[in-house]
């Protein structure tokens, strides 16, 4: 057995019930992670309306969220590469679930902001571990599609949280939004207790017997007991575990990929939390009622699940790199046109299209592309570093957005976002590598040492 033999066996598996089960186990946690993030839009609008907060204190709330997510993303990378994907996944789910329940009883905005920081620890970790873990189980033929499907779970939470806020907040109050997130996270934690550890990670840590046992169980489920095809004969002894230092991310081809991942994360978070999260507050500032503001936002955010689903359809056709470049520039054009619209129907239509493009980009980049760029030994630290840098940049974004909106209105805000999309499109076009159809080991290998790519068997869709 060589270091890549477990990856070869996972990659040759036909698509089956195991892959669907992993998608739903990971996706359920990601859904409530997204719900907890996106409920901020409706909650902050309601807090302003009730006189419990204002634009400045809302900025502190959002910054506390990003600060917690920054720390959580980094810790997830360190813990996930050291102690395993499964342990880290359950730990961060418990953190944001318990903190969400505590937030439902917060007496004021100060306590709510403090609880939000703790929530952010789990929220930032969930994103890093979720996408990274799923990529290690999926064969190349479906890896991009399933990662984008995971983004559908995550990003459908935007519409559910927004529409749920539209139905719940005006009648039951904002506290119920946090209660729903906490209870949902607890249910998913129980469901995921028997989720397997990543065999790729186990093999990378030198725990070959455990990796073999889990891989064998997966194979028997896919092919049936006694029908598992023989693995290729290996003449090289299993490699010992290697302690890969963080500095590896700043050398050779990994430096280029780290830069690419950082740019993607910064721009993605800038768009999502610099525009979408602020939509209800913008509408309220323009004189709309809470109910109408949330209604406008709910219609526009229908583009989130649609965009993620379209990203799923395109991940294995046009590819991750080409899709990111294309939709960066499409979103840029829509972003420049949006501030010029005055008719309510046109505002909602352009907003819908912009949100859809944003979440196509999220599905292709954050979900599918970035986790593929790094080798197993350092995958979560690579993803965590990129996510952490994006979160660090976004700690100050709420204050910048508030300043730009005060000075130049929505046009100034969309100008900043369009500039970010331009930079992302250029960086991925110049520095990015296409990962469609490649084994993870082949993507992360140096050009002269790439292992053979396994051909995954396919079942009819």
Image (cartoon, grey):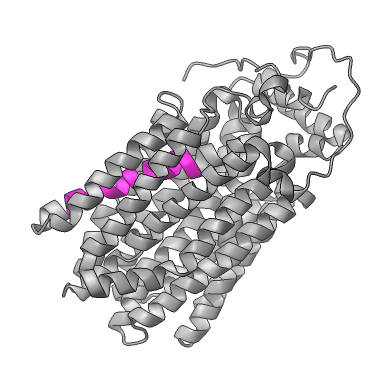
Q: Position of residue 456 (x, y in %)?
A: 61, 17
Magenta-tinted stretch:
348-366
Is 156 situated left or right of 186 in this image? left
At 61% from the left and 30% from the top, the residue drawn is 138
- Residue 215 vs 273, above or below: the answer is above
Quarter containing the N terminus: top right
Is 58 situated left or right of 144 in this image? left
At 78% from the left and 15% from the top, the residue drawn is 231
- Residue 203 vs 385, above or below: the answer is above
Residue at the left extreme of this rendering: 343
Dividing the picture into quadrants, the one containing residue 444 is top right
Q: Say whether residue 429 is magenta.
A: no
Whether residue 22 is visible: no
Dividing the picture into quadrants, the one containing residue 203 is top right
Give the number of callouts: 0
Q: Position of residue 163 (x, y in %)?
A: 31, 59
Is 21 situated left or right of 213 in this image? left
Dividing the picture into quadrants, the one containing residue 58 is bottom left
- Residue 332 vs 294, above or below: the answer is above
* 315, 325: nearer the viewer: 325
């Amino acid at each position: 057995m060589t270091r890549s033999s477990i990856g070869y066996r996972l990659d040759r598996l036909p698509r089956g019930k195991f892959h669907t089960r992993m998608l739903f186990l990971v996706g359920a946690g990601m859904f409530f992670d997204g719900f907890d993030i996106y409920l901020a839009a409706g909650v902050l609008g309601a807090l302003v309306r009730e006189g419990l907060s204002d634009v400045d204190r809302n900025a502190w709330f959002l910054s506390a969220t990003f600060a917690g997510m920054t720390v959580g993303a980094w810790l997830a990378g360190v813990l996930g590469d050291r102690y395993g994907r499964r342990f880290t996944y359950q730990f961060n789910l418990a953190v944001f679930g318990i903190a969400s329940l505590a937030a439902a009883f917060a007496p004021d905005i100060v306590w709510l902001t403090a609880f939000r920081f703790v929530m952010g620890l789990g929220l930032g970790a969930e994103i890093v571990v979720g996408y990274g873990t799923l990529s290690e189980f999926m064969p190349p033929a479906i890896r991009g599609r399933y990662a984008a499907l995971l983004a559908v779970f995550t990003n459908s939470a935007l519409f559910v949280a927004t529409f749920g806020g539209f139905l719940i907040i005006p009648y039951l109050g904002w506290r119920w939004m946090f209660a729903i997130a906490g209870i949902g996270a607890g249910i998913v934690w129980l469901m995921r207790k028997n989720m397997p550890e990543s065999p790729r990670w186990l093999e990378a840590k030198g725990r070959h017997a455990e990796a073999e046992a889990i891989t064998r169980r997966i194979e028997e489920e896919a092919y049936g007991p006694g029908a598992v095809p023989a693995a290729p004969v290996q003449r090289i002894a299993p490699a010992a575990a290697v302690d890969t230092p963080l500095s590896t991310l700043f050398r050779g081809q990994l430096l280029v990929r780290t830069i690419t991942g950082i740019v993607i994360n910064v721009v993605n978070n800038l768009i999502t939390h610099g525009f979408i999260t602020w939509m209800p507050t913008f509408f309220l500032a323009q004189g709309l009622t809470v109910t109408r503001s949330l209604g406008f936002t709910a219609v526009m955010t229908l583009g989130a699940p649609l965009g993620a689903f379209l990203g799923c359809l395109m991940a294995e056709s046009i590819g991750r790199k080409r899709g990111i470049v294309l939709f960066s520039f499409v979103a840029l054009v829509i972003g420049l046109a949006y501030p010029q619209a005055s008719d309510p129907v046109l505002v909602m239509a352009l907003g819908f299209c912009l949100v859809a493009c944003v979440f196509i980009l999220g599905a292709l980049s954050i979900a599918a592309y970035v986790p593929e760029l790094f080798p197993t030994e350092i995958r979560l630290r690579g993803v965590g570093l990129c996510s952490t840098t994006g979160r660090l940049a976004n700690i100050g974004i709420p204050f910048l957005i508030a300043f730009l909106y005060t000075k130049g209105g929505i046009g100034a805000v969309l100008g900043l976002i369009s500039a970010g999309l331009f930079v992302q499109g250029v960086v991925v076009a110049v520095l990015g590598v296409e990962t469609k159809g490649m084994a993870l080991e082949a993507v992360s290998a140096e050009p002269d040492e790439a292992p053979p790519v396994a051909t995954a068997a396919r079942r009819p869709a």
